[in-house]
Image: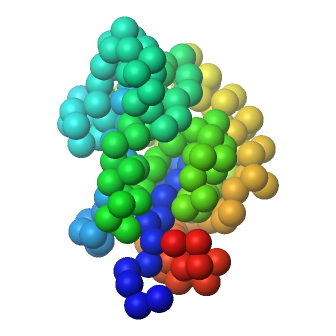
Amino acid sequence: MFEKPPGLLVVISSPSGGGKTTICRSLLQGHSEYLYSVSLTTRPRRPSEVTGKDYIFVSEKEFRDRVARGGLAEWAKVYGYLYGTPKGRIEKAIKERRVILLDIDVQGAMRIREKYHQSVLIFIFPPSLQVLEARLRGRFTEKEETIERRLSIARKEMGYWERYDYVVINEDVKETIASVEAIIKAEVSRVERLKRG
Ligand code: 5GP
């Protein structure tokens, strides 16, 4: 009872452009004790991204090899590319009883929920589809057809919200971060979790 609370896997999903990258970054800056689950992906690196920090960029063959070796906790095809969560860091978080953030899509979130009772699922909603579109266009990193495809997938993804534990509407990024922090704080203290260990 007086030991550190068990590890917590905080899954944060939102449609592309929903603001989750900013949210995760800010949470990690404010909580150096949190870990971040750096995913493997076959998507090409964006200029602002750092290998090993944002993603581990790999070829399709490397990705498939990793899957075959059982190295991924979950993986999915998103927007035509493969994305996966390496098992190693998740296991480290559980062993060291730490909070780990996973910025993954709805398919991955469902897999993590099935596999790890230590998980809590948070869905971040954009204030509206119009705002989402404006944010995607504001990035200037994607082609028009990619934006259209992401928007149509976003509409589908948003239908998954009922399968999450919490929904936060991202009207104001500071408030959203405060809400996610409050959820994490409460979840860490849940008696059900403490009992399960
Ligand atoms: P982006 O290419 O915009 O960084 O991410 C595209 C989508 O892939 C986002 O919804 C993101 O949450 C998701 N994603 C990133 N890493 C993973 C992962 O390891 N597994 C799954 N299932 N989805 C991921």
The one nearer the camera, 191 or 81, is: 191
The one nearer the camera, 178 or 61, is: 61
Q: Is residue 15 visible?
A: no
Q: Is residue 188 visible?
A: yes
Count of residue discs: 0
Residue 118 locus on image (x, y percent): 55, 61
Figure coloring: rainbow
Instruction: Single out the residue that lies furthest toward the bottom.
Output: 2
At 43% from the left and 37% from the top, the residue drawn is: 85
Residue 76 locus on image (x, y percent): 56, 27
Image-quadrant location for residue 70: top left
- Compared with 32, 16 (above or below) is above
Residue 24 locus on image (x, y percent): 39, 57
Is 131 left or right of 143, judged from the image as shown? right
At 38% from the left and 84% from the top, the residue drawn is: 3
Is 42 left or right of 165, judged from the image as shown? left
